[in-house]
Amino acid sequence: MRIAIPLLLSLALPVAGFASDAPQSTQHVYTFAVALDAEGRLERLEPYGSMPGAAGDALSAEIRDWVFAPDAGAREGKGTRTYLRVVVDEPVHGDYRVVSATTGPALAAMTPPDYPMRDQLSGREGMVVLRLQVSADGAVDGVDVHAATGNVTRAMAGAAATASRQWRFAPEQVAGQPVPSTLLWPVCYLGPRSAPSTCNWTGPDDQRFSSKTVLPLDPNVTVSYAAAR
């Protein structure tokens, strides 16, 4: 019988509590379609997909005060349409904290990776960070394994890469034209008793990221926000 696992591509990440086994907060991913003028002024902000937690309305209002900076190519055109991926910690008392906010193409359809049976039964777990080349039409044109952590096997890394080739994205647009992107995308393999911190990962410049943070390597827009509330 296959063991059920939370592949942290789409499910909430529980953050361990200090006083009990009950989660004290949950990480959610909110995605927004964002339209900016050539100077980076926000023209439109709307949810893309479902709003998974209770912070959606408050987060939408907060985002309107963030600073967006298009790259030089976008500024010379007619503006940018991008997708803002915001990872949020939502404690049980109802407040929230922004963990990360990145721009890039938005995931439109995905096939969850397999968890090879032999690796499940032997308790192997960890993170596979994929480097995805997303074409202007939203297809995944190229996949490399950028990094692996824990005791991930070649079969686990291969399963993640194979699944990602079937994913589809809504691409960014610059001056009305869709553009390609390159992303670092984490895929987390966890067992039922695993600590969530198993799937935090280290990106460029030794920065630590949540298992839900997707990192664009060639962003057309960067965003400044208040990381702590």
Image: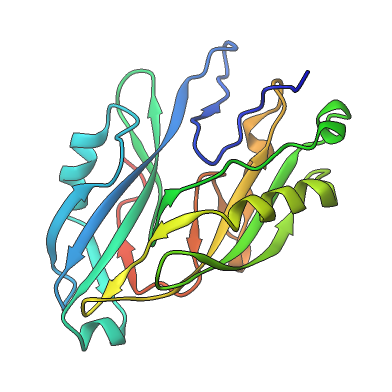
Position in image of residue 205 (x %, y %): 60, 68
Camera-side residue: 220 or 61? 220
Q: Residue at x 57, y 19 (%)?
A: 18
Residue 222 in which image quadrant: bottom left
Answer with left or right where residue 141 lies relative to residue 67: right
Position in image of residue 208 (x %, y %): 58, 53
Answer with left or right where residue 130 lies relative to residue 136: right
Q: Residue at x 31, y 80 (%)?
A: 71
Q: Is residue 40 above or below residue 3?
A: below
Among all residues in the image, which is located at the extreme left?
43
Q: Is residue 5 visible?
A: yes
Q: Is residue 149 visible?
A: no
Camera-side residue: 114 or 212? 114
Q: Residue at x 13, y 68 (%)?
A: 41
Q: Is residue 99 above or below residue 43?
A: above
Position in image of residue 211 (x %, y %): 57, 44
Position in image of residue 76 (x %, y %): 21, 89
Rendered-image quadrant of the N terminus: top right
Q: Residue at x 19, y 72 (%)?
A: 40
What colouring method underlies this structural image? rainbow
Residue 173 in which image quadrant: bottom left
Answer with left or right where residue 199 lies relative to residue 57: right
Please tell me how many numbered marks the rendered image carries: 0
Rendered-image quadrant of the C terminus: top left
Q: Is residue 169 above or below residue 12?
A: below
Residue 73 in which image quadrant: bottom left
